[in-house]
């Protein structure tokens, strides 16, 4: 039976429900649908609880961290605040959506991706009358996707942060999220380059003149992707200046877009992404629609027991994810 947001009893056990996040547990008890047409429309169940306890987490008028611990019930909201701030940092400047075709959320730690094999190599040949239609076989892979737990240990005494503004504390938490995001990106780049354990490392080619990148090199690289599209390029800090130095990157339209928005477009229409995880002397190209699957075991995890009980001295903040290649030829490497 649905309850009003100000009647929901908050307990630690809400973080224990298998397959549901804290916010999903709240939504089950206090559905957002019942607030349509009211001043609370647009807030999710967690945000309504912040309003219930008059906790402001953003802006110049944000409250102190201590406000969460004014009562035993409001303290239950603190781990979710931590998780949301870290997740915001994960999403800020995150380029993983630009290089992954799909994201798979799992409950456990075991996941097998799929692979497909076409008996005629995927050619679109005409099928004569009475002839057998060529088959594409989709099957589960033998090897598991390797998942990695990435995170940071929050080391701070309650006394050290209790009088800090929540808005300022959120900046620190977002930075933790950004650091975790860079770790996941390093995992993704490693799988693209070296494969996911299934013998599917990226095929490599080289520029015509070692150490120099030309427009002709990019065209040849782009041409290797047929039947896929080269729509994303990952470059490290050593190869990015070489790309931007090409005459073809200096036309008026490309320059206007770069100076006005910071977005980079190559002459082939691929999205250019700067990535410190790319090894020196390499450019990674991929068709983001077919190259990579991201597998996530849950969302941002925090040690809620410690946080609720004000034991912040060593509270872990973690996420668990891994990557699998979908089609090997949808990603390639250009050695410069």
Image (spheres, rainbow, N blue to C red):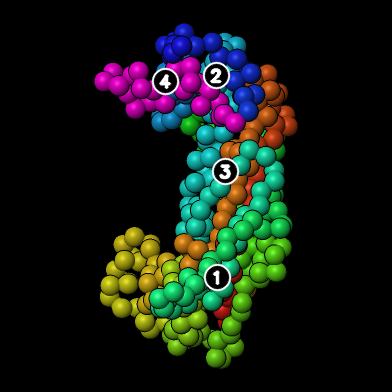
Real-space Cα separation, disc 4 to disc 3, in angstroms? 23 Å
- Residue occupying image coordinates x 57% and y 64%: 137
Q: How crowded is mark 2: few (under 14 residues within 10 Å), some or many (20 or more)?
A: many
Real-space Cα separation, disc 2 to disc 4, in angstroms? 23 Å
Q: What stretch is highlighted in magenta?
A: 19-44
Considering the numbered disc 3 on the image, is that residue within a helix, a strand or a loop? strand
* Residue on which disc 3 sits: 105
Of the two numbered discs 2 and 3 in the rendering, the one whose residue sits closer to the viewer: 3
Is 193 a magenta residue? no
Residue 284: x percent and y percent?
55, 71
The answer, for residue 62, to whether it is visible in the render is: no
Real-space Cα separation, disc 1 to disc 3, in angstroms? 27 Å
* Residue on which disc 4 sits: 31
* Residue on which disc 1 sits: 118
**Lateral position of residue 21 relative to residue 255, left or right:** right
Residue 68 is marked as 2
Of the two numbered discs 1 and 3 in the rendering, the one whose residue sits closer to the viewer: 1
Is 33 a magenta residue? yes
In the rendered view, would you say 226 is above or below 177? below
Q: Earlier in the sequence, mark 4 or mark 1?
A: 4
């Amino acid at each position: 039976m649905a309850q009003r947001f100000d009647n929901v009893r908050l307990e630690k056990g809400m973080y224990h429900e298998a397959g549901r996040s804290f916010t999903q547990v709240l939504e089950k008890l206090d559905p957002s649908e019942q607030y349509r047409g009211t001043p609370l429309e647009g807030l999710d169940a967690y945000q309504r609880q912040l309003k219930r306890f008059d906790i402001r987490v953003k802006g110049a008028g944000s409250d102190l961290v201590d406000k969460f611990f004014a009562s035993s019930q409001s303290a239950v909201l603190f781990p979710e605040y931590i998780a949301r701030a870290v997740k915001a940092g994960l999403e800020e400047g995150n380029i993983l959506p630009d290089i992954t075709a799909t994201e798979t959320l799992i409950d456990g730690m075991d996941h097998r991706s799929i692979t497909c094999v076409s008996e005629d190599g995927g050619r679109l040949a005409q099928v004569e009358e009475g002839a057998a239609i060529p088959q594409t076989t989709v099957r589960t892979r033998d090897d598991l996707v390797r998942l990695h737990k990435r995170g940071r240990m929050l080391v701070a005494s309650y006394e050290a942060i209790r009088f800090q503004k929540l808005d300022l504390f959120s900046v620190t938490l977002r930075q933790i999220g950004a650091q975790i995001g860079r770790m996941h990106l390093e995992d993704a780049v490693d799988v693209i380059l070296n494969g996911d354990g299934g013998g599917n490392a990226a095929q490599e080619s080289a520029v015509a003149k070692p150490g120099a990148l030309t427009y002709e090199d990019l065209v040849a690289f782009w041409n290797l992707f047929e039947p896929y599209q080269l729509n994303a390029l990952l470059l490290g800090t050593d190869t990015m200046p070489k790309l931007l130095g090409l005459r073809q990157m200096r036309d008026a339209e490309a320059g206007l877009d770069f100076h006005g928005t910071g977005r980079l477009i190559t002459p082939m229409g691929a999205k250019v992404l700067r990535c410190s995880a790319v090894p020196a002397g390499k450019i990674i190209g991929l068709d983001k629609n077919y190259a990579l699957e991201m597998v996530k075991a849950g969302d941002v995890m925090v040690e809620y027991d410690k946080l609720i009980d004000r034991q912040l001295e060593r509270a872990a903040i973690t996420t668990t994810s891994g990557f699998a290649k979908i089609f090997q030829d949808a990603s390639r490497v250009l050695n410069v």
